[in-house]
Image: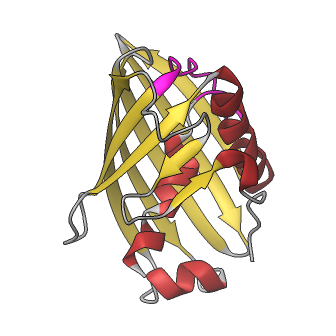
Amino acid sequence: MRRYAFLLPLAAFAAPAAAAGFDLPPRKPGQWEMNIQVDTAAMPPQIIRMCLDAETDKLLNAKFGGMASSMCSRQDQTKDGDSIVLDSECKVGDMKSVSHTVVTGDFDSAYTMKTKIDMSGSNMTNSLNKVMPGGPMTQETTIVAKRTGACDAAFKPGDIDLGDGRTMNVRDMPDPKIQ
């Protein structure tokens, strides 16, 4: 069950290029390793490896960007020195999320995303209720992504290794649906 708790931040923030309302640079093609740590949970970090080319980076963003555009009433992007600041307000049913993300680094070699998301509402979706049945919560997540070089020989563009022996390809992923 804890594996699914990480999919929300992954879906919302780890696919950074052209997500709805946000204009972040595309990642340099190659093998990327993402260390995802939910700072407010007593869980070990999750390591995800992805092999990306320009097409699959755009595809990953398109799948989750469309979901964000239908759920979010506000998505603001500003610059603060070398940082990119992303703020959004989203709603699914009566579940509301307000997030604040600061992105540092570049999309050629490494970047870090620090996100704080406040979620509330009594009618959370079934999948979210399973991972956070207690209702309102604050989650802080840090994603440290680095390009490790060319894609490993066992990977093809679009492959995502979730770190638990499961690999999927973004081309085979269904479009996200909110239940």
Where residue 37 appears, as percent x and y from the top left, is 27, 54
Q: Quadrant of the N terminus?
A: bottom left
At which x and y percent is residue 113? 37, 36
- Say whether residue 28 is magenta: yes
Picture quadrant where residue 129 is located: bottom right
Quadrant (top left, top right, bottom left, bottom right) of the C terminus: bottom right
- Position of residue 19 relative to residue 122, above or below, is above
Across and down, in percent, residue 124 comes to 62, 81
Q: Is residue 136 above or below residue 102?
A: below
The one of 62 and 80 positioned closer to us in this rendering:
62
Position of 132 relative to 12 (above/below)? below
Residue 165 at x, y percent in the picture: 41, 64
Q: Is residue 147 magenta?
A: no
- Give the magenta part as a residue range: 17-30
Q: Main secondary structure of the magenta part?
A: loop
Which quadrant holds residue 56? top right
Q: Residue furthest top?
A: 81
**Seen in the image, is 44 located left or right of residue 89?**
left
